[in-house]
Amino acid sequence: MKSVFLAFAFISLFLSAHGQRNLKFEPEIRAFERLDSLEKPATGQILLYGSSSMRLWNNYAQDLAGYRVVNRGFGGSEMSDAIYFFDRVVLPLRPSLILLYEGDNDISNGEKTPKRIYEDFKTFMALVEAKLPDTKVAVYSLRPSIAREKTMPQQREVNATFKKYCRKHSKKAFYIDVFDALCTSSGQPNAEYLVGDMLHLNDKGYAVWTKATRDFLKEKIVQDTFVAPTLQLLPQNPHYFQYQGKPTVIVGSGEHYGAVMNLDFNYDTYLATLQKDGLNTTRLFMGAYYEQPGAFGIQHNTMAPAEDKLLLPWNKEQGKYNLDSWNDAYFRRLHDFMQKAAQRGIIVEITLFSAYYGAGWAYHPLNGLNNINGTPADLLPNRVNTLDNGSLLKFQEAYTRKLVTELNRYDHFYFEIQNEPWAEGKDTILVWNDYLGPEDLKQSWLQWKNTLEIASESSRNWHKAVSGWIADTEKPMGKKHLISHNIANFKLPVFVSDPRISIYTFHYASPEAVTMNYGLNKVIGFNETGFAGKSDETYRRQAWRFMMRGGGLFGHLDYSFSVGYEDGTDLSNDAPGGGSPRLRSYFKVLKNYLESLELTTLQPDQSFLQHVEGAFSYAMRDATQWIVYIEPILSKPAGIQLILPKGTYTATWTDVQTGSVLLTEPVTITELVHTLRSPAGTNDKVLKVEKK
């Protein structure tokens, strides 16, 4: 305690003595503060801190891909400046690791000896120890340059003191040596690594710098501490996700995709409701498609705002859209939504395009009738999202690249290329139920319920082009985001061959959609429900069935969210689906239950069930547990015939409606097949068997 007090006292004297010099850095420091106030960075990142070698590391995010990194370098600074601005720049970020480069300017300015620089470095370390005791520091050696070749002896002296200090404080401080690597074989500064001023590093120089940094991180730092938080497939089990370094499933129940485009929709309340209800996703259409009031029989449709409340990515000129002119108001609202979703832990599906369902194409901005850019006005809807769409393609590409660029900074989303591509342009239609025909459906347009529609080859080729635009735009950027392909209604074996796709989604999905595609080792998702009545029980059972087959994503289309009911309580909405606070509580139970298991090893497995008497069943296992979800068909207890190794186990039955434990009992297995009896009742429930 005494040492901390003395450190604070010394630092206070230091800061008061250095105030005047630091006024020249105020504009840069205030810019950092403004940036952090607009989008507060996550704590626990790697912080690049120091002079121009840090400030000019423009490709740091790409060079250190896989790590969470934030750059707060300010050119011309000295070690004393790094100390002076510590509370304003470093402390709010609370980094896990500081990569520090200072001392070069201290020497060249002619005011400080190597000894003085070393004393300032120790003051900096004392500050870190006092205010950020869990933060580590890696200090770079001072680097050679032709412009400052005369200072190389002092640089070497400073480097020796840094190295000695780090060796002595090896749990807190680390030394990254770049000096020799940036010299020629004769020990002189290597011009090959410098820009025209012969002082600062060029791309080749930063490649050397990056290699030294990555080698250090790999050798000395546990990567999981700084693993990039961007949503990705779970490395150990790519049927699920990893977000902010943690295994997760995506489960949600959200509005009809218009939260940003509909100015009447209060997404602050909406996102707060999703968080309160324990869910973690929403789906967002970006503006290439919207609906008009009354579409699809939806009474209160958040994706069908009044014309004066519709906000799209393009500006209008004389009543028509200009596809070359971006609407700043739209992007401000989009960024505000994304920032608030991130704060609430909500993962966003960014749906770029959609089918137009025939007549819907007539009023959309990309249609030549509605823009000033000369896109085809007579283009048939089934050619819009293909490579054979004339001049429209370049505007689709520009729109995609613009959104990818705007959104790249965020970690909590994935792209879906197109919603329901099979709705226009079908190569194949298969009968879903041989015993149900058009005459049984009464309304001919509902025949889609009895068909498996496969998107056309021209649609699939266009999808590949769009995924290529996404990947190409993100290539020089720091973050890489997952891409989803919406395959079909119900179930189909995936027929898409595109290595950029990580998620395959289905609408109104059968659990068989997971089973027949599980071998792809990607996430299989069910991202739109509906057309199955309004019963909460129906959609709860759909969710459990799908996820217990190995699905990694479930998103319910929740019509209880509407304008004025952003808290999800519009139970009177006349729409082709359901949604309610109670249903969302069911989904919360499902999400929490799955995430209580070991997702790194979780997989569907029926092999430990010989038979389930009186109930439909869906089974999984992880490294230490066996899980069975049942839907009883009789009120009496169901019989679960288990095939497990002999031994002692604990069996726990859970109510999937409330999440409460119905029964816990010890189980001793002495024979090949052991029968467990479920609690009575026809309500669905889930069993977990764990070896003691």
Image: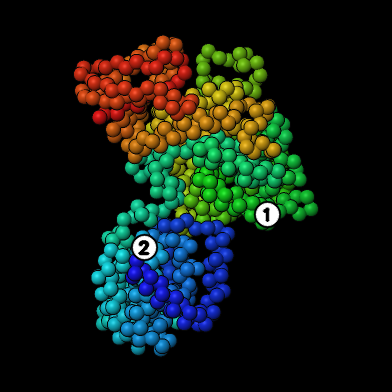
User: Do the residues under discs 1 and 2 have CB atoms within 8 angstroms?
Assistant: no
The mark closer to the camera, 1 or 2, is 2
Disc 1 target residue:
329
Q: How many marks?
A: 2
Q: Earlier in the sequence, mark 1 or mark 2?
A: 2
Q: Where in the figure is residue 41, as x and y percent of width and height?
A: 49, 58
Quarter the C terminus occupies: top left
> Left or right: 366 with respect to 81?
right
Q: Amino acid at mark 2?
A: Pro
Figure check: 86 above or below 554: below
Q: Quadrant of residue 170?
A: bottom left
User: Dot 2, how many residues are within 10 Å of its Cα: few (below 14), some (14-19), or many (20+)?
Assistant: few
Q: Where in the figure is residue 575, as x and y percent of width and height?
A: 66, 27
Q: Quadrant of residue 385?
A: top right
Q: Residue at x 38, y 70 (%)?
A: 5
- Please, which residue is most extreme toward the front here? 2
Q: Residue at x 51, y 38 (%)?
A: 279
Q: Secondary structure at mark 2?
A: loop
Q: Nearer the viewer, residue 257 or 456?
A: 257
- Please, which residue is most extreme toward the right here? 318
Disc 2 target residue:
133
Q: Nearer the viewer, residue 152 or 364?
A: 152
Q: Amino acid at mark 1?
A: Ala
What is the distance, in whole Å, between disc 1 and disc 2 at their CAs? 43 Å
Q: Where in the figure is residue 629, as x and y percent of width and height?
A: 40, 23
User: Dot 1, how many residues are within 10 Å of its Cα: few (below 14), some (14-19), or many (20+)?
Assistant: few
